[in-house]
């Protein structure tokens, strides 16, 4: 993966109301549609039905429960995946020959990580939490280990020699050069893999879950309770925006941007 | 060191290093296969729970002999080859149209972000309600997941096209169409390619998931059906093929496109990765 200069243009400098107009237009269209067109209600229930369901499930705490369950699994899989992948990746990357041996295999495993493991996970762990967490951990693990190895390998040899010739070795070398040097790539990998992990979470809950947002959304299809499906989609979208904003932008600001590794 | 090694040209050196890398990579694959095969008797579980590489190879030959595998591979490739370009074209067109007006671009940006945040996986249930299990649902999921990153990055490119060039062309009497094709589109190309790469990656896993839910053929279906019928070796055949297909797509389609466009012009812009 390349690490080119990051360019982001601020599209946020706008009157706050302007961005609300399209949302209002969509809601108005949704409100108007059943009054203009004739279609069965299960295809697209009226806004009021979805809103009632949302209020009801907030009041009785069932929505918070499903969100909590899903987020807890994401966190568990995420931390387990990283805790295993980064040390292992560093161990592999420290020797150039070992890294050369493992990199193609890791690249291959990274490309099948995630959703494709769900059926196998069901055989190994049964339907339920185990399968879901395994699939997320698996997604994060393979992406992180690959990016750790490539990140360490991308550290310029000159820096290695500079640290060495000043007497740096062992833990000093690891903490002063290798970890900071590979960090940008590791974080980039984490960010990308979290996007895959989130999809894997929703997908795994749909196929192998017994609770959680994905389960809630897919289960409702069988009973044609479309309002639950739509509520699930809105919550999934809102949560992902929040996660991406709060978690990753914050981490990047604290680490990568501070050290000038990634420019905006 | 012998004489011939010293006299080798830099080019030959690079080549031999590349070859050494490829050999080491092959060694890694063999090592993995060996460890997997060696671990089977140690684990000592039923083949359906932990199949050996030999079982997987046998399942592969069996699936080929029955003519199942070629059909599944062709179906998966067909779905992907229709969905991804369609999503990309729609994304580019929409991105240019929206991007040409600053106010519209700024107004729509939050809604577009929100729609992209509702990942394609989450759309599949409602697609199933609207269109049933089948090609339409799969195709829509693929188009959706490619559309948004391409659209967003096109929009970004259009909005950041150097105004000075636009002004220069305008003052020389260029039409709106000329400004679009000579400045704005080339300026947005790196963004478009980045969007395509991000979308293509999501789309490939999205395809597998959509096939698990909504298809009766394809690699995703093979992976799911194998596990359902406890023919786990078939599941692993599917997973390996999936990896090989993705590496093929990456190596022979995405990278050449990147090389032909972005790298040639020395423009590397990393845009939104989500």
Image (cartoon, coloured by chain):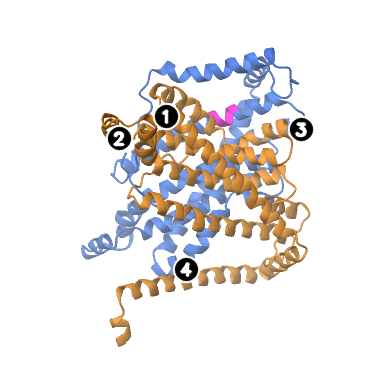
Chain colours: A blue, B orange
Residue at image point 69% right, 20% down: A45
Secondary structure under tag 1 reads helix
Residue A222, numbered label: 3
Q: Residue at x 66, y 41 (%)?
A: B138
Q: Which residue is mark 4?
A: A101
Residue A227 vertical position relative to residue A28 in the rendered view, above or below: below
Q: For residue B131, which quarter of the picture?
A: top right
Q: Residues within 10 Å of mark 3 (few under 14, many from 20)?
A: few
- Check the image and name the residue furthest to the bottom: B2
Q: Residue furthest left?
A: A166
Cα distance in 3D space between marks 4 and 2:
45 Å
Check the residue under mark 4 and report the chain it is in: A
**Label placed on residue B167:** none
Nearer to us: label 4 or label 1: 1
Residue B71 x, y percent position in the rendering: 72, 56
The residue at which mark 1 appears reads as: B99
Disc nearer the start of the sequence (3/4): 4
What stretch of residues is rendered in magenta? Answer: A234-238
**Which residue occupies the foreground of this view, B81 or B12?**
B81
Separation of disc 2 and disc 3 at Cα?
52 Å
Of mark 1 and mark 2, the one earlier in the sequence is 1
In the displayed structure image, the side of residue A40 where residue A160 appears, left or right: left
Q: Residues within 10 Å of mark 2 (few under 14, many from 20)?
A: few
Asked whether the residues under the numbered discs 4 and 1 touch, taking CB atoms below 8 Å apart as contact, a structural biologist would say no
Give the residue drawn at x 70%, y 26%: A226
Q: Estimate how packed mark 4 is, as few (under 14), some (14 to 19) or many (20 or more) residues with alpha carbons within 10 Å.
A: many
Residue A175, quarter of the rendered image: bottom left
Q: Nearer the viewer, mark 4 or mark 2?
A: 2
Q: Does the CB distance between marks 1 and 2 fall below 8 Å? A: no
* Numbered mark located on residue B162 in the image: 2
């Amino acid at each position: 993966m390349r690490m080119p200069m990051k360019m982001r243009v601020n599209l946020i400098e706008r009157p706050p109301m302007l961005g609300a107009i399209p949302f209002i237009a969509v809601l108005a269209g949704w409100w108007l549609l059943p009054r203009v067109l004739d279609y069965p209600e299960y295809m697209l229930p009226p806004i009021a039905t979805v809103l009632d369901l949302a209020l009801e499930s907030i009041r009785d705490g069932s929505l918070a429960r499903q969100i909590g369950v899903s987020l807890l699994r994401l966190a568990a899989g995420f931390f387990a995946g990283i805790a295993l992948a980064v040390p292992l990746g560093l161990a592999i990357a420290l020797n150039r020959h070992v890294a050369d041996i493992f990199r193609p295999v890791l690249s291959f495993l990274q490309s099948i990580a995630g959703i494709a493991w769900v059926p196998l996970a069901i055989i190994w762990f049964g339907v339920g939490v185990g399968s879901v967490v395994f699939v997320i951990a698996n997604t994060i693990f393979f992406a992180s280990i690959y990016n750790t190895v490539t990140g360490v390998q991308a550290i310029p040899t000159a820096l290695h020699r500079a640290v060495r010739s000043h007497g740096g070795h062992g833990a000093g070398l690891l903490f002063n050069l290798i970890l900071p040097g590979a960090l940008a790539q590791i974080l980039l990998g984490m960010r990308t893999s979290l996007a895959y992990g989130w999809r894997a979470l929703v997908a795994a809950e749909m196929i192998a879950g017994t609770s959680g947002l994905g389960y809630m959304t897919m289960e409702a299809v069988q009973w044609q309770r479309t309002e639950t499906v739509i509520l699930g989609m809105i919550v999934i979208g809102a949560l992902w925006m929040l996660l991406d904003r709060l978690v990753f932008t914050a981490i990047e600001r604290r680490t990568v941007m501070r050290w000038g590794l990634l420019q905006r | 060191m012998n004489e011939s090694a010293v006299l080798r040209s830099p080019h030959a050196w690079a080549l031999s290093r590349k070859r050494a890398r490829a050999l080491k990579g092959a060694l890694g694959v063999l090592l993995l296969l060996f460890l997997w095969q060696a671990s089977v008797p140690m684990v000592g579980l039923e083949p359906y729970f932990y199949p050996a590489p030999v079982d997987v190879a046998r399942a592969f030959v069996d699936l080929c002999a029955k003519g199942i595998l070629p059909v599944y591979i062709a179906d998966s490739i067909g779905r992907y080859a229709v969905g991804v370009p369609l999503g990309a074209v729609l994304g580019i067109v929409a991105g240019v149209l929206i991007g040409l007006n600053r106010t519209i671009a700024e107004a729509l940006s939050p809604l577009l972000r929100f729609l992209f945040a509702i990942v394609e996986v989450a759309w599949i249930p409602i697609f199933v309600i609207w269109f049933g299990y089948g090609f339409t649902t799969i195709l829509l999921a693929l188009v959706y997941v490619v559309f948004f990153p391409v659209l967003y990055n096109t929009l970004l490119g259009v909005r950041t096209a150097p105004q000075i060039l636009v002004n220069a062309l305008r003052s020389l009497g260029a039409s709106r169409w000329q400004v679009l094709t000579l400045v704005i589109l080339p300026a947005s190309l790196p963004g478009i390619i980045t969007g395509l790469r991000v979308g293509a990656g999501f789309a490939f896993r999205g395809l597998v998931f959509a096939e698990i839910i909504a298809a009766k053929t394809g690699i995703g279906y093979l992976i799911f059906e194998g596990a359902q019928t406890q023919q786990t070796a078939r599941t692993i055949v599917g997973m390996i093929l999936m990896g090989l297909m993705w590496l093929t797509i990456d190596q022979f389609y995405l990278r050449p496109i990147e090389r032909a466009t972005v790298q040639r012009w020395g423009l590397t812009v990393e845009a939104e990765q989500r």
